[in-house]
Image (cartoon, rainbow, N blue to C red):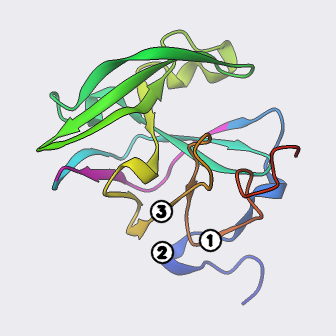
């Protein structure tokens, strides 16, 4: 297989070490969906992904891609030097609750303005997150929210010993 041949799911190979810093924003060409509480709680063909050196992409779905009863405001906020102030969301579906498992930027910086009214989620808190037909693996560690698809090469920020990268 050459470096440009697609891998599983038709996604071309990518190395997270080729991603830029500062990060870049890119539309997602494939459908994205999230399963939780025994159901698909979000589905869209209008997602964005943020690409940053050493990180698997973080996927942002339009808030209206989520079933209406799923997102509840959660306590807390954080600051990203690139995107601005994040607010957190609790996701609820069926008998499942994932407190603070989603985040969004109400007033993102100009470079990330397309993320307004979009929500990202920690894949590890969900039953399944999918890009196209590919089930993603959560980014290692509990801090970052990247989604690892089979075409990605690491190592990835978040693995043990990566705090100083």
Mark 1 → mark 3, Cα distance in angstroms: 10 Å
Name the residue rendered at 72%, 57% in the picture. Answer: 159
Which callout, 1 or 2, points to the residue nearer the camera?
1
Determine the secondary structure under disc 2: helix
Instruction: Specify few, some or many for label 3: CA neighbours under 10 Å numbering under 14, 14-19, or 20 or more.
Output: some
Where does label 2 land, which residue?
Answer: 9
Where does label 1 land, which residue?
Answer: 151
**Quadrant of the image occupied by residue 58:** top right
**What percent of the width, then of the height, locates residue 142?**
57, 45
Where does label 3 land, which residue?
Answer: 136
Answer left or right for 3 relative to 144: right
Mark 1 → mark 2, Cα distance in angstroms: 9 Å
**What percent of the width, then of the height, locates residue 18?**
83, 55
Name the residue rendered at 52%, 74% in the picture. Answer: 10
- Magenta segment, principal secondary structure? strand
Relative to 135, residue 116 above or below: above
Instruction: Specify few, some or many for label 1: CA neighbours under 10 Å numbering under 14, 14-19, or 20 or more.
Output: some
Which callout, 3 or 2, points to the residue nearer the camera?
3
Instruction: Specify few, some or many for label 2: CA neighbours under 10 Å numbering under 14, 14-19, or 20 or more.
Output: some
> Residue 85 — which label?
none
Determine the secondary structure under disc 3: loop
Is residue 36 located in the magenta-colored stretch of the structure? yes
6 or 126: which is nearer to us?
A: 126
Name the residue rendered at 40%, 63% in the picture. Answer: 132
Asked whether the residues under the numbered discs 3 and 2 touch, taking CB atoms below 8 Å apart as contact, a structural biologist would say: no
33 or 100: which is nearer to us?
A: 100
The magenta stretch spans which residues? 25-37
Quadrant containing the N terminus is: bottom right
Which of marks 2 and 1 precedes in the sequence?
2
Q: Determine the residue located farthest toward the front in the rendered image.
A: 160
């Amino acid at each position: 297989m050459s470096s440009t041949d697609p891998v599983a799911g038709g996604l071309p190979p990518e190395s997270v070490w080729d991603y830029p810093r500062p990060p870049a924003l890119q539309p997602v060409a494939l459908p994205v969906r999230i399963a939780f509480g025994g159901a698909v709680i979000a589905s869209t063909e209008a997602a964005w992904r943020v690409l940053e050196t050493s990180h698997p992409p973080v996927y942002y779905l339009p808030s209206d891609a989520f079933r209406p009863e799923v997102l509840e405001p959660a306590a807390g906020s954080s600051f990203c030097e690139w995107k601005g102030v994040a607010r957190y969301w609790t996701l609820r579906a069926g008998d499942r609750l994932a407190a603070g498992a989603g985040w969004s930027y109400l007033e993102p910086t100009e470079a990330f303005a397309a993320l307004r009214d979009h929500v990202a989620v920690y894949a590890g808190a969900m039953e399944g997150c999918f890009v196209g037909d590919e089930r993603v693996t959560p980014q290692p560690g509990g801090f970052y929210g990247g989604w690892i698809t089979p075409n990605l090469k690491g190592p990835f920020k978040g693995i043990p010993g990566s705090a100083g990268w």
